[in-house]
Amino acid sequence: MRRKRDSLLGALCLAVLLLCGILPFGTAQAAAGETAPLTILFTHDTHDHFLPSANESGGTYGGYVRLATLLQEERGAAEHPVVTLDGGDFSMGSLFQTIYDTDAPELRALGAMGYGVTTLGNHEFDYRDEGLARMLTAAARSGAALPALVQANYKPPAEDTTSWAAWKEYGVTDYVVLEKENPSGGESVRVAVFGVLGVDADACSPMSQMEFEPIADAARRVVEQIQAEENADYIICLSHSGTTKGKGEDYELAKAVDGIDVILSGHTHTTLEEPIQVGDTLIVSCGAYTQNLGVLTIGKGSDGAVQLEEYRLRPVDDSVAEDPALRELANGFQTLVEERYLSRYGLTFDQVVAENPWTFPTIQELGKVQREETLGNLIADSYVYAVQQAEGENSVPVDFAVVAAGVIRASLPQGEVTTSDIFEISSLGFGADGTPGYPLVSVYLTGRELKDVFEVDASVTPLMPNAQLYGAGMEWTFNPNRLIFNKVTHCAQVLPDGTHLPIEEDKLYRVVTGLYSGQMLGTVNSKSFGILAVTPRDETGAPITDLESRIVHSADGAEVKEWYALASYLQSMGTVGEQYQAPEGRKTVAPSWNPIELLRAPSKFALAVYAVVVLLIGLVVLVVVLLVRRRTRRSRGLKGRHRPQSGYRRYRG
């Protein structure tokens, strides 16, 4: 018996030695019934960040030229099959976007970095459906290596033959399946990747002209098709929908649709230090602007459930060397940007436009707290300056210039400020002239509507931080503890000489903002359930139906772009003025729980709410009184029924 046991032990040792000779040391193999692990390298919302961006403390962050280095390092060290994925919004964020529709630099850069798949975000539609079609065609005909492009629920209508031709030429599909070899010599894996775009992303792309299918419906349809036809080991969703505080559209997607192993969540620029697990689905996000590279390794047990093996966010910072090949690609595109776009403004890419001695809030901080921001003040003041310069002596005074937090895409670095730095701050969109950059528009609002604009800032911002407003020419104060849509307690017009004037409700005031912000003014009515009303008007007070007819032009007929308004204002100062060192009292947040402060000067909406509350309280009191009376009467009746009659004596035997 002992000899037999020793023989079995020797055989076992021999088997272990043989396995050690066959397999590389330290490499885990999938056990019977398990799926080989997969490493996912991922980004989202990279927004054209080819080059490192200046931060507010004198350093830099991000950049494709550095990201490429980290991608190579991770692939070289990987012990498992690797896929490289992007969650959309790869465009609109730097001067490189100015050649988006002619040269497709973003997709070509993703291809050069070895990305396997990406999807479309809302900002890919900033040049509208025609611009996206031109970009896809340019990419397909460039001959460069390109990532696959997946989009399952956001597509051109059938009659848009131009867009469909471009989508087909590039090869846009609902999903793709990648066969990835195991670098350790083990089993390869089949990875299915599909893309969707969410409700909020659709709302942020009002000119896309696309048809929207609910993301859960599309995801369920695609997952079922993959499961039926593809024999995929993993199913990954590139969702440009977003997560906020651990919830959001992608959280709901994971709850609604079974079979998705990983959701790469873009759009909200979220940074998740750890994945969110919803059932058998992992949700991951690594932040925007190439600040981090996400690294996720997953496996599957014999039950088929996804298992987290590793999750890391690698900072793309000053410690990462640039990749020479990506730097050369970026330099070539930079030359095209200067020749085709910046030359018309008399500027160059790295030209120093101004000196900034002050520290401005980081882009991560901007809009997160309800308060006045110096960067918002600076941008709003630049709008006033640019309109005055464009219109000259005949300029009509601008009563109110306003910018929303959501259209501010970068902060102002300390020290030397270049053309490129300025463009990144106001980098979105393009104008009616077909050139990049949203232009300024000039409209009129009544004083009553202006008060509603201030109420939007006070009441809607906690629900939508991107809606926070910064302005010039007006001041307003609000108590965040007051009833919603009745938070503003004071507002006034501030003239250039510092004089304060009360706002007249029926007077028309000239308002200047960016085209995109102007387009979003119409959503105030729906977002406030009709309680607030803001209607852009012309000089006569007539409602405006075409905001592009209100674009501000310079004397030579050129559109005044948001970014160039800021550039010209900074250039006029040379050194950023001391007034931008600290807030000036343009917006004051005055929280108070004092009953008088909570209830004074109620609006019509507030009066209606208070009336309903008083009525409800009155009804409750009335019901309670009636119940008490009924109970009292019933109690009295019972006592009377059992009371002994007069003259009755109890017999005792």
Image (spheres, helix red, strand yellow):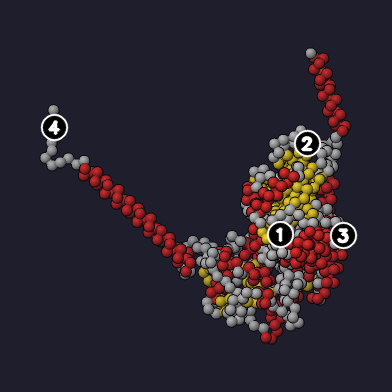
Q: Nearer the viewer, mark 4 or mark 3?
A: 3
Q: Which residue is mark 1?
A: 155
Quadrant housing residue 149: bottom right
Separation of disc 1 and disc 3 at Cα? Answer: 25 Å
At x 75%, y 49%, the residue is 193
Amino acid at the residue labelled 3: Gly
Amino acid at the residue labelled 1: Lys
> Going by the image, does 176 lie left or right of 24?
left
At x 86%, y 62%, the residue is 142
Q: Nearer the viewer, mark 2 or mark 3?
A: 3
Separation of disc 4 and disc 2 at Cα? Answer: 97 Å
**Label placed on residue 143:** 3
Residue 415: percent from the left, percent from the top?
76, 67
Q: Nearer the viewer, mark 1 or mark 3?
A: 1
Nearer-N-terminus badge (4/3): 3
Secondary element under disc 2, as helix, strand or loop, is: loop
Q: Which residue is mark 2?
A: 30
Residue 187: percent from the left, percent from the top?
82, 39
Separation of disc 1 and disc 2 at Cα? Answer: 39 Å
Secondary element under disc 3, as helix, strand or loop, is: loop
Q: Quadrant of the N terminus?
A: top right
Q: Which residue is mark 4?
A: 651
